Image (cartoon, grey):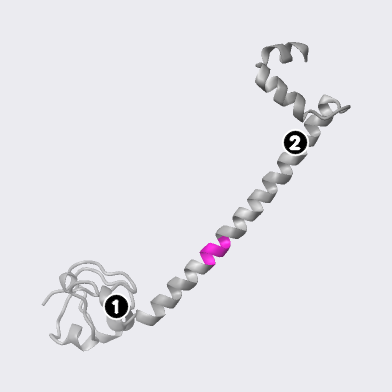
Amino acid sequence: MRVLRESISPFWLDTLNQFSLQGASVSGKLAIMASLAVVFGATSYYAGNEYLDNQTKARLSEIEAGKTANLQLTSIVVATEPLRFGQTLDAEMLKLVQWPADNLPEGAFTSIDEVIANGERKVIKSIETNEPLLALKLTG
């Protein structure tokens, strides 16, 4: 301990002496400091988590309130099963789902009759289940 005290600058030595506990051993001081570190660390972790959870819930509430108020939906045609190259479309392979009106994909169809109106539309690019039908993936 003596060598350690000689290698410390006088400023830090005075600071160490001011905060040392009178009559406590080094291992006792270490245990107290470690305990305080654990308590303060755990408290900081808990308080930080609570703050972030509350901020997240408040932000999600704002987002949900804004979405439902301004969101306008329209119908869009999607596939009910995987469609492969060369397959002829019929009404049983398609369904309508709600889609945000301001985010419609380019070339999307808004009614099943519009898709099968030509009678013999065929798939020219694979379409997966629940994927919107786009004009560039169909003939005609």
The quadrant of the image that shows the N terminus is top right
Could you tell me residue 114's position as x and y percent? 18, 86
Left-right relation of 83 to 15: left
Mark 2 or mark 1, which is nearer the start of the sequence? 2
> Which residue corresponds to the image point at 16% horizontal and 79% vertical from the top-left?
121
Could you tell me residue 111's position as x and y percent? 23, 86
User: Residue flagged by tag 1: what amino acid is it?
Assistant: Val
Could you tell me residue 26's position as x and y percent? 82, 25
Q: Residue furthest left?
A: 140
Left-right relation of 97 to 109: right
- Give the residue at mark 2: 34
Q: Quadrant of residue 95?
A: bottom left
Q: Is 17 placed above or below 63 here?
A: above
Please tell me which residue lies in front, 126 or 32. Answer: 32
Q: Secondary structure at mark 1?
A: strand
Taking the magenta stretch, the answer to whether it contains residue 34 is no
From the image, give the main secondary structure of the stretch colored magenta.
Answer: helix
Which circle marks residue 23 in the picture?
none
Q: Is 31 placed above or below 8 here?
A: below
> Which residue corresponds to the image point at 17% horizontal and 69% vertical from the top-left?
124
Q: Is 36 placed above or below 6 here?
A: below
The boundaries of the magenta stretch are: 53-57
> Which residue corresponds to the image point at 57% horizontal and 61% vertical from the top-left?
53
Query: Which of labels 1 and 2 is toward the front?
Result: 2
- Give the residue at mark 1: 78
